[in-house]
Image: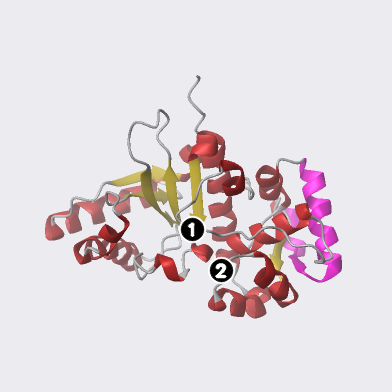
Amino acid sequence: MDVEHNKRKGKKSMTQQHKPAQSGTGITTRQQAVVQALYQFRFVTAKEMSDATNVQPETARQLLERLRRTGLVARRFEPSYKLAGRSAEYYLTPAAIPLLRRNIAYVSESELKQLYRRAEASERFAQRSIIVFRLANALERLYGERLDFVPKALLTAPDLDYLPPSLPEGLITIEDEDKQRPDQHIFVEYFDEAIAIGIQARQIVTYMQYQETGEWERTGFAFPSVWLICESEKVAQQIEKRLQYYGQEYGSGIEFRIRLLEDVLQEKPKPT
């Protein structure tokens, strides 16, 4: 996803996540965009940053390395990464906090506190963060300027207090291609193979219970559909069983859509 996407669209998003770039920050506008993406998605690789900023992977890597030399960004690259064909993973350090406060309209205090512990984040957390960034980029390619993807880090803003207490990985808004119908809203969840069956069930039930509260009605939009992005067919089958069971119990009218991660990443835009 192009991190300057909402600026170019020229319309108000459901969240206002950027302030105009300020002078005197000591870094370039492009580097500020990289810092914002790191805040939004927590962990990135040069490949994902390349896709998001529309530059070559080597250019993205150089951007990240320059920021690393400033102390705003740190890198995780273990010897095992090279053997496994994994790329270096980058994340923000606490030194970035003043910059974030100046350049993002709302920053979550809990997210900022997490920067002090980011170096100790689990491998699974880092990989999930990178996958969500990859999904955002893939959907940006698919829908272009019609897409607004708001990741979890930005969903804690005070004016979004109507969202579920257990926040999704992202909230998508897709503008109707012909502008004849209302925008489509979608909650995005990601289920990897490590997630416990009980947590799968809890996340599904959370949406059914949230719909019953009527909190979303404050937006004036139809209740969002829910995309359940699954790492594998095995996980997709587990989720399907949970949906059948709890759908009968709650009688939910939510549109749940199970999607394989690989299918979403490889989906191509429709020819115009």
18 or 194, which lies in front?
Answer: 18
Q: Residue at x 65, y 46 (%)?
A: 52
Q: Is residue 161 left or right of residue 129?
A: left
Q: CA distance from mark 2 to mark 1?
A: 9 Å
Q: Is residue 118 left or right of residue 263?
A: right
Which of the labelled discs sits on residue 15, or is there none?
Answer: 1
Q: Main secondary structure of the magenta part?
A: helix
266 or 226, which lies in front?
Answer: 226
Give residue 221's position: percent from left, percent from top: 30, 50
Which of the labelled discs sits on residue 155, or is there none?
Answer: none
Residue 174 in which image quadrant: top left
* Amino acid carrying mark 1 in the image: Thr
Q: Range of the magenta residues? A: 56-83
> Which comes before the other along the chain, label 2 or label 1?
1
* Amino acid carrying mark 2 in the image: Tyr
Q: Quick one: SS at disc 2? A: loop
User: Do we see residue 1 in this rendering?
Assistant: no
Q: Which coloring applies here?
A: secondary structure
Residue 58 in which image quadrant: top right
> Which residue bears the numbered disc 2?
106
